[in-house]
Each structure stands twice: as structure tokens, then as C-alpha cells.
Amino acid sequence: MDGSILTGSLLVATPMLDDPNFRRSVVFVIDDDSDEGTLGVIVNRPSDLAVGDVLSAWSGFVSDPAVMFAGGPVGAGSGLALGMPGGDDIPLGWRPLANVEKGSQVSRLGVIDLDAPPEILGGALGGFRVFAGYTGWSEGQLGEEIDDGAWYVLPACAEDVFSAAPSSLWSRVLRRQGGDLALVSTFPDDPTMN
């Protein structure tokens, strides 16, 4: 890997990545620090648990589907939320992602403080999603996995994080890249069926 900062990018699992934690996953990178590692959330794994069953005060503000997402295998008992302001004002309790180019597709995404008052912050959000757990790689670990061909590093759009159809996100993200990756998007879930 070339050492570039991955914050705000997508990690899309290649068809060869068969680890059940990451198989056909789309990970949004929240923080990438060359000294401390990388943190992200899986954005295409909705659970059956409604956000209202866990964080009832936030339930009226969450993007559809209004369920908790399985953000990853680390810290599955903790919650992490991403949001996007609905207007030009920066809402109290919203922190932008570090090292993201201004004006990029994801420059308006940030981390939400779930201890902030939902009645104040929630109405100022144009998109809001809650994740149980996260993904994490130690310094250099993700770079090795990328070099080994486990992940495609692709540009993200805010719509990826708040997709109303997360189960088809893996193939849609690959298809919009065109070329060889569009072909990969048609790779069967079970390679023996090819």
C-alpha cells in the first residue's frame, strides 16, 4: 500500500475474502492513522434489532432501515453513530472526520455523540445511522491485507453509509466503478455456481 490516508474511503471485500466477519462487506473508514491503525464500520449489515429498542430517544431520527447495523466484530456491545448535517450549520454533538478533503463526497459525514440531546441534534441531521461494534486494524495490518488482495479501496459517497438498500451495496459499489470491478459485481455468492 502507498501510505495514503484512507479516512472517508470504502474497503470493499474482494470475492476471495472468505472470513465470515468480512465476507462481501463494505467498510466505511472513519479514522486511519499510520501510527495507531484504522477504524471503520461495516455499512451493509443491518441487524433485526430496531434502534428504538436500544436508543429509544434517537429512533425518530435514524435513516431507513431504522435498525442497528453490525459495524464489525470489535466492541459489538458498544455503539457508534455516524451522521450528516441536514443544513449548513454544524450541529452540537457532531464531529467531522479528520483528514477528509473539504468538498469531497464524504466531507459532511461525522461521528455523533450519542450522549448529546437527541431532541436538539437529531432534527439537524440529514442522515443518521447507529452501529453495534466496529472494525479495527493495528498499524500496518490493513495495508498488508490490501497488498494481499483482500480489499478494494474505493471512493465513498455519503449515500453508501445511509443506503436504504444495504444488502445490495456490495454489488452496487463495485458496479459503479466500471471496468473489471463492474464485472466482479456479478461474481456469484457461491463460486461453485459459476
Image: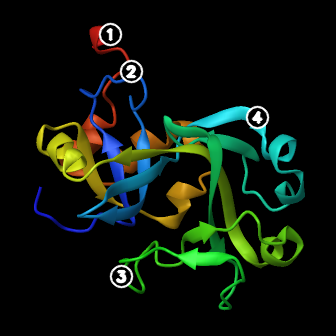
**Left or right of 91: which side holds 27?**
left
Amino acid type at circle 3 is Glu
Q: Secondary structure at mark 4?
A: strand
Residue marked by disc 1: 193
| Model colouring | rainbow
Q: Secondary structure at mark 1?
A: helix
Amino acid type at circle 1 is Met
> Where's residue 77, x and y in %?
64, 38
For the view shown, which residue lies furthest in the front direction? Answer: 36
Residue marked by disc 2: 189
Q: Earlier in the sequence, mark 1 or mark 4?
A: 4
User: How far is the residue under mark 2 from the one under mark 3?
Assistant: 35 Å
Mark 1 vs mark 3: give the one in front: 3
Residue marked by disc 3: 101
Q: Earlier in the sequence, mark 4 or mark 3?
A: 4
- In this rendering, the answer to whether 29 lies above or below 5 is above
> Where's residue 188, x and y in %?
35, 22
For the view shown, which residue lies furthest in the top direction? Answer: 192
Amino acid type at circle 2 is Asp
- In this rendering, the answer to whether 141 lies above or below 47 is below
Q: Secondary structure at mark 2?
A: loop
Q: Secondary structure at mark 3?
A: loop
